[in-house]
Amino acid sequence: MKEGAKSDVRVSGGITRRGLLKWTGLTAIGTAALGTTGCAGFDQTDLAETGEGTEEDPGTWIPCNCWADCGSKGFNKALVKNGEVVRMGTDQSHDDSPDCPQLRACARGRALRGMIFGADRIKYPMKRKNWQPGGGENAHGELRGKDEWERISWDEALDLIAGEIKRVLDTYGNEGILLPGGVPQRTGDFDIGRMMYMMGGCLEQTGSVSSGAWTEIKNRIGLAEDVNDRMDLRSSELIVLWASNPAWSRAGVQTYDYMQCKAAGTKFISVDVNYNSTARVLTDEFIGIRPGTDCAMMLAMCYVLLTQDNPEKDPLIDWDFLERCCIGFDADHMPEGADPKDNFFDYVLGTYDKTPKTPAWASEICGTPAESIEKLALEVARTERCAIIMSPAPARTSSGSQMCQALMCLGAMAGLIGKPGCCAACDKGHAWELGGYSTIFKGGGMLGEPRNGTLGSIEYIPNPLNDKKVDLNEMWTSIVYDQEYTGLDGNKYKNPTHLIYDRHENFLNQGAGLMLGIEAYRKVDTVIAQNLVMTTTCKYADIVLPVSSMWERFGDFTVAYREQMIWTSQVCDPLFECKSDPEIALELADRLGVDKNVLRPVSEKQNVVNMVAAAQVSANADDTWENLVSITEEDLAELGVEGTPQEGRIPILDFKRQGIYTIERSEGDGRNYVPMEAFRKDPENNPVKSESGKMEFYCQAFVDAVDNWGFAEVPPIAKYIPAVEGYEDTFSNWETKEKGEYPFQIISWHILRHSHSTFADVPNLREAFDHPLYMNPVDAEQLGLETGETVLITSKWGKCLRPLMVIDTIMPGVLAMGQGAWVEIDEETGIDMAGSMNVLCGPKLTPTGYQSYNSTIVRVDKWDGEPLQPDYLWEAREVFEEE
Ligand code: SF4
């Protein structure tokens, strides 16, 4: 590791470089200070009690941003003392209680210093030595990821970028420029996109990375991703957590909320490939299942209900709900034009295909004992208040949409829809969407129109090339193989990408088919990336721009769960030569003749204050709203912004200092939420979003939509279709059960060291939370492998190395690895040393274009080469040291 401590130089903002780089080298001390979840291990001691307030500078706690898209939300604050960030803290705005928990940050938020002041921070604009503008051989694309860097001035960098954008637009049209990633258009990270839209558009991606099949199917079948209010779930008698491990994947209050259910008497059952950390804390029973086979188990559960239902003595099916609220479940309730034989019940019973979907049938596929499937089905149906809550993970396979529909069918049959304490739902987990409608509204954000129309949103600018968006499974193949791709309008297009501009994302690392992505990057004329740290995308770029973090800007305003709003502030001045994303876009706009007043009509500061000013809070349970903040003329003058005085709940400057506002909750507070309650009561007047307004066991609209995309075909009902690279594909001969070239299934987990690929570079997180390949002892013994050995994992898409961890909690035949590691390719062997899952996952086509990385098959071999060193000892991707 490079020696970090060079001098006692104070960088701008009074941050002592020596002290901060020393932090990046912390190992044991840093590790000991980390908790394991958002709720665990946090020291709540007051600053005054630590004695830290007795020194010359008592220090100031500043609410600071964690921008990770982790699925949860914690509140972070930094203690700045004598010009240094000396400590991280979290929510202490009120006493912690089960009804009103503090919004505690997870270990990653508390390790943010390691990223912001890390050695791999991009300090200056830089250019790859052997790249020249103009495309062709002079670009030396083959050297991307291997070349040396030279430092250049901002003017030189921006002139080169503007010149390349003009050249590509003139030569290849707007389609010649590809901007991977999403486009919220809020904090400025996406201003390069707004600029391109104003110039006629650019290519962008479509397709879900996160929610898998749920994104496109949920409304069409009439089952939105929506979970009951956390207070309501305390009334559940049984919660089945299906493929769900919030202690790792949603580090924060969600597991704590489930613990309140447990305390209230709820029984928990976990259905998962692994007896995971959440299951160990909560569950009374664990049911193992192979990846990608969830649909088969659900169908078998429906079979049990259908064959054992006795309306008089043992009612298992909610016939009244099916009759009033659903279509397509049997031959008598089919939509017009559908073949009556193509109904769900006859498929489950095997009436026409002669394959009853019995627990024994499912057991062969799922690896779950038939008795366990039957017992679970009966327990779910016989429990008055039962909730099945699933993560999006099982929907990330090529046949994920059938699984989504099967969950809907099971939930509808077992009477789990629209009742207190009940649900059958995918918890998509993004913090602000958990638990139904909001009790708070941020002004001007992505989550809907501001309620105060006079303040708020920056006008949305659409991309004129929206229809030509390229699906993320075709993005790299269409470049590498010169293949046509299918646009959103269903037409086929060539992909003429000559310039890739990565605006503060890391999609190359975070998308499936990483090895193809590197080939695509090496094929185009020019790659530009802007970021805080030397991400994979930056590593494979030609020009890299240093971006200031959210700690170095005026701040940000965001909703956490449905009960908190967070206003983070500036912790220090921009480090080194960093500029903010909006500043970079404005300087490029100057060079490209784009109207800066339209691109960014208000300053970053004004935009944040506008959002705060327009924020609204639910005044009580009857849907009346009031302003969150009161504002005076003096406040506006102190903030240095324009605006209008207003009345609100709290003074704006108090909110800014505190950084968090929480709506106090208590049981019976009238803010309860049960999804689809109104629909259950009166489906005619409260229809769901499906074409029929009912829940569709038979869904022609989804079949038509999938046909329109043209990637794959789907049946109108939930049928079990083996996933591409699923369990069945691990065999060369299914009948004789002879294993094939890739005998293991592998899935990717959220692990506590990363939030996707954010934080993957922070050494003390690497040390605190390891990143091995997990394997069952039965498999390890067969292969002659032991914990700690380095193994080579090979798929048809790529190869990587990992240390092995043998655990008896994971299903035999199933492997797992954390997602998000930054790929480190050994250029001689082509092997990734870092264990990046997307090296192993291919860009497989799926019905609606989502990514299917939870159906991947691999082989594992003992590694004869040098064993891997722990990655917290690896050299940081530091390009230039501070001058
Ligand atoms: S990673 Fe998520 S839970 Fe952790 S501090 Fe950041 S926002 Fe909060």
Image (spheres, grey):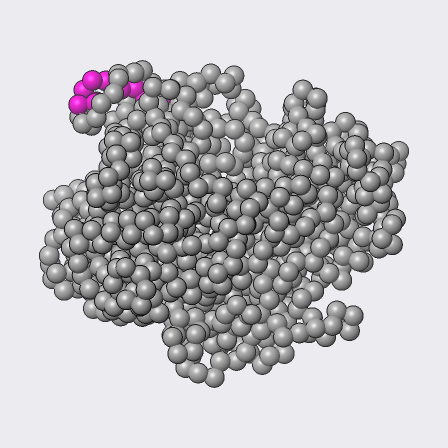
Where residue 591 appears, as percent x and y from the top left, is 21, 44
Depth check: give the residue in front, 46 or 258.
Answer: 258
Find residue 783 and report its image quarter: bottom right
Where residue 225 appears, as percent x and y from the top left, is 58, 38
Depth check: give the residue in front, 236 or 213.
Answer: 213
- Residue 247 position (above or below residue 73): below
Give the residue at the far bottom of this rendering.
864
Q: Residue at x 88, y 48 (%)?
A: 351
Task: From the viewer's perspective, tell me whether residue 387 is left or right of residue 768.
Answer: right
Q: Residue at x 81, y 33 (%)?
A: 333
Whether residue 823 is visible to the viewer of this picture, yes or no, is yes
Give the residue at the far front of this rendering.
171
Depth check: give the residue in front, 863 or 643.
Answer: 643
Task: From the viewer's perspective, tell me whether residue 259 is left or right of residue 357.
Answer: left
Q: Residue at x 18, y 27 (%)?
A: 640
Q: Report the quarter where the N terminus lies.
A: bottom left
Q: Residue at x 42, y 54 (%)?
A: 496
Q: Report the quarter where the C terminus lies.
A: bottom left
Whether residue 502 is visible to the viewer of this picture, yes or no, is no
Task: From the viewer's perspective, tell me whether residue 255 is left or right of residue 734.
Answer: left
Is residue 634 within the magenta segment? yes
What span is in magenta?
A: 628-637
Depth check: give the residue in front, 156 or 581.
Answer: 156
Where residue 21 appears, as percent x and y from the top left, is 21, 59
Is residue 319 within the magenta segment? no
- Residue 567 position (above or below residue 154): above
